[in-house]
């Protein structure tokens, strides 16, 4: 498999991006890494840090997309950027998947307008695998669609269920709708309408889920509009970071607390590992025709390597074909039902 990598996207580009890609080459069955970006900067970075490029080639680009660029116009205004060229290479079949730690909005626009949606998908969504107290779960949408319709949320549940079943090997994923209460009557008009659609869905819909239930892994897929999902994601990450910092302060308070730490160190280490977001590397743009992976903007080498791992999983399980077939089956069922009525 050939993986296209945006070498200039992210806070730590190009160094950590290059290092992460090389770690991926060592760990996974990758035929070629195709870096898009400023060839001079990439080569200088490689030389300065004594990195040995393996199974890699560089496609030179003159422009870069910043985190501040306007997503809806950036791909048009910067046709020779590392992200735009990456999407074009993906579309032309030069590579099998595209991974970037760059501007999330631009990546979503590129995936939708250049790679394009799977037939039947109303809106692609950003799906993030997140650790919890019991097991990892998928949160979607995490920011691609701030405003949604009920049918979008219904499809997010479908795509998320297929992701957890095929990628995370969850036998019968429990899908829940993020809400301010578990009762069917709770929520705004959008959530209520989505609930009615989802309770008749072909996947395992378990109803509404409150924010306080999410960190315990009560659902395998948590569905929300992009505004709500992004808020959940950022709050989740911030709360986890604050908690770990407070635990650290408590154990560093005095000599006795430092000695106490030795007795619970293994448990603390297990907790840190279980809640380590770097293990999953980033988010997937579900609903487009080819694998597009959004790595964390602050990704280090290990995080970016794991973002590439998600692309590898995608290609190994042929998830996009499974989504396309499921949607086609639903269209056929709908047509049969309409004819009977």
Image (cartoon, rainbow, N blue to C red):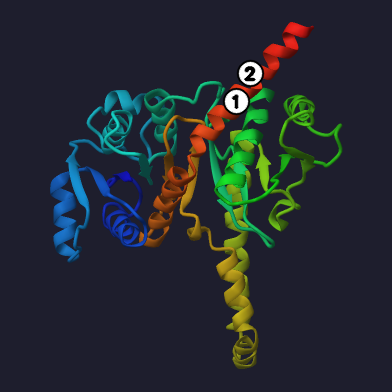
Is 301 situated above or below 283? below
Taking the spot 64% from the left edge, 84% from the top edge, the residue there is 264
Q: Are marks 1 and 2 in contact (CB under 8 Å)?
A: yes
- In the picture of the structure, the residue carrying the numbered disc 1 is 327
Taking the spot 22% from the left edge, 53% from the top edge, the residue there is 55
Quadrant where the N terminus sits is top left
Q: Which mark is residue 331?
A: 2
Query: Quadrant location of residue 335?
Result: top right
Residue closer to the observer: 166 or 208: 166
Along the horizontal axis of the image, is 230 left or right of 71?
right
Taking the spot 63% from the left edge, 18% from the top edge, the residue there is 331
Is 315 situated above or below 91? below
**Where residue 211 sits: x, y (%)?**
73, 48
Along the horizontal axis of the image, is 126 left or right of 161?
left
Residue 176 visible somewhere in the drawing: yes
Report the number of discs. 2
Circle 2 crowding by C-alpha within 10 Å: few under 14, some 14–19, many from 20 = few
Is 213 situated above or below 151? below
Residue closer to the observer: 34 or 178: 34
């Amino acid at each position: 498999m050939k993986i296209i990598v945006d070498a200039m996207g992210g806070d730590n580009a190009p160094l950590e991006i290059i290092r992460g890609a090389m770690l991926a080459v060592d760990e996974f069955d990758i035929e070629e890494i195709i870096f898009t970006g400023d060839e001079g900067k990439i080569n200088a970075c490689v030389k300065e840090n004594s990195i040995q490029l393996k199974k890699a080639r560089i496609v030179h680009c003159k422009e870069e997309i910043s985190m501040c660029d306007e997503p809806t116009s950036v791909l048009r205004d910067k046709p020779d950027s590392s992200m735009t060229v990456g999407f074009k290479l993906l579309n032309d079949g030069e590579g099998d998947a595209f991974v970037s730690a760059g501007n999330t909005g631009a990546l979503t626009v590129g995936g939708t307008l250049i790679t394009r949606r799977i037939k039947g998908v109303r809106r692609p969504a950003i799906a993030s695998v997140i650790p919890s107290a019991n097991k990892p779960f998928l949160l979607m949408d995490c920011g691609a669609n701030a405003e949604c319709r009920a049918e979008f949320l219904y499809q997010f549940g479908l795509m998320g269920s297929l992701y957890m079943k095929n990628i995370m090997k969850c036998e019968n994923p429990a899908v829940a709708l993020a809400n301010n209460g578990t009762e069917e009557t709770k929520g705004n008009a959008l959530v209520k309408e989505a609930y009615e659609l989802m309770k008749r869905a072909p996947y395992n819909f378990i109803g509404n889920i409150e924010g306080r239930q999410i960190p315990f892994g009560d659902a395998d897929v948590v569905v929300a509009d992009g505004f709500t999902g992004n808020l959940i994601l950022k709050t989740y990450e911030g709360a986890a970071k604050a908690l770990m910092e407070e635990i650290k302060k408590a154990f560093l308070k005095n000599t006795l607390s430092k000695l106490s730490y030795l007795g619970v160190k293994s448990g603390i280490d297990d907790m840190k590992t279980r809640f380590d977001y770097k293990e999953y590397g980033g988010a997937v743009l579900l609903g487009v025709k080819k694998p597009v992976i959004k790595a964390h903007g602050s990704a280090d080498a290990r995080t970016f390597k794991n973002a590439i791992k998600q692309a590898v999983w995608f290609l190994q399980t042929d998830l996009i074909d499974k989504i396309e077939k499921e949607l086609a089956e639903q269209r056929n069922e709908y047509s049969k039902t309409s004819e009977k009525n």
